[in-house]
Amino acid sequence: MLKSRRRRLLPFFEEHALDLLLIEHPVNLRYLSGFSGSEGALLLSPEGGWFICDSRYTVQAGKEVADLLLVEQAQRQEAIADLVRQSGGYRVGFEASHTTVTQHQGLAVRLPGVTLVGLGPELDTVRNCKDVSELEQLEQVAGLASAAFEAVLPLLQPGIREDVFALQLEFEMRRRGADGRAFDFIVASGIRGAMPHGRASDKAILAGELVTIDFGAIKDGYHSDETVTLAVGSINTRQQQLYQTVLDAHDRAIAAIKPGISCRELDALARDYIKAQGFGEYFGHGLGHGVGLDIHEKPVISPRSDAVVEEGMVFTIEPGIYIPGFGGVRIEDTVAVTSDGCRLLAKVSKQLVIV
Ligand code: ZN
Ligand code: ZN
């Protein structure tokens, strides 16, 4: 499995005439080697490669990393430079989106005569289509988070503070086996709902308000992402109209997902609908993003995206309307693309619930 993931890098070797490719970003490291620690390096050739770590991680790497030569070192860049020299490589690719200027300079000084070739965000697209084991893990963590949300939902009553609800939700996720929260939960009630990223505050949730709750869990490196907007007590016609517009936009996009459709078209389906209902100026962000070992990864579902939907992709659909001084609604599901459509990984129903 890891070998087949690394084979996805071969086109980069060819395109850039690389002898070696250096991977240090922890998420890519985990994806390509199985190593779950926070520091290490992978120096790959088209045929194989080396995994380099310091003594803190030797035992862990021995268990997690198969099919690669393990190198323990005290100074990582020295070890990388030694291996490059030993192998006679003269063009070495690196992750331009993740490597710091200091790291780059450190390598350049140690490797005179070697060309360091920066590969941009396109390198991360090797993680676009999830394999079977990833799909299982993403499904499991999404199901866990949805179940935790439903378990704590009875606590959502007028008077409870946003941050208290967020804490209870995180506690319930961890009780059910999550390693932690995927990000700081958004709990935005009443006029705070107009902030797309309104982190849970000490505000009490009141009757007559909409409350947007964006939550996710992390387990074994994989993330979940889901947003539910609820009505607390009865809400007025405008709030209902907002909710229905976002739900319809969300449903339209999800119904259109299948391999071959462009991510830009998906975005337009939801965006044009929201615009036609008169709320166009209140939907500023993209429609969605990939979810996997990173909470935000490729593909991007936005008007600027040039990605095309493929089977195995996992991404969110999350239209929203945010009206300053009034409030907002966002509805978000994470889906896995199948051969002829998609299936929902997030499990909470998106029909309006009044608590
Ligand atoms: Zn979210
Ligand atoms: Zn999201």
Image (cartoon, grey):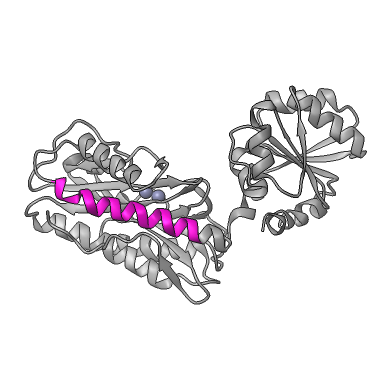
Dominant SS of magenta comes to helix
Expressed as whole percent of the image width and height from the top left, the position of residue 299 reads 53, 55
Q: Nearer the viewer, residue 19 or 328?
A: 19
Q: Nearer the viewer, residue 286 or 135?
A: 135
Considering only vertical position in the picture, is 191 above or below 314? above
Q: Which residue is painted at 91% across and 35% down in the image?
A: 86
Considering only vertical position in the picture, is 201 above or below 273? above
- Residue 325 appearing in the image: no
Residue 226 lies within the magenta run: no
- Residue 340 appearing in the image: yes
In the image, 20: left or right of 281?
right
Expressed as whole percent of the image width and height from the top left, the position of residue 21 reads 77, 43
Expressed as whole percent of the image width and height from the top left, the position of residue 59 reads 66, 35
Q: Which residues are magenta?
A: 136-156
Considering only vertical position in the picture, is 162 above or below 300? above
Residue at the bottom extreme, as displayed:
340
Q: Which residue is painted at 29% across and 40% down in the image?
A: 171
Expressed as whole percent of the image width and height from the top left, the position of residue 184 reads 35, 37
Quadrant of the rendered structure where residue 132 is?
bottom right
Residue 154 lies within the magenta run: yes
Considering only vertical position in the picture, is 340 above or below 352? below
Q: Which residue is painted at 13% across and 56% down in the image?
A: 238
- Location of the N terminus by quadrant is bottom right
In the image, 209: left or right of 331?
left
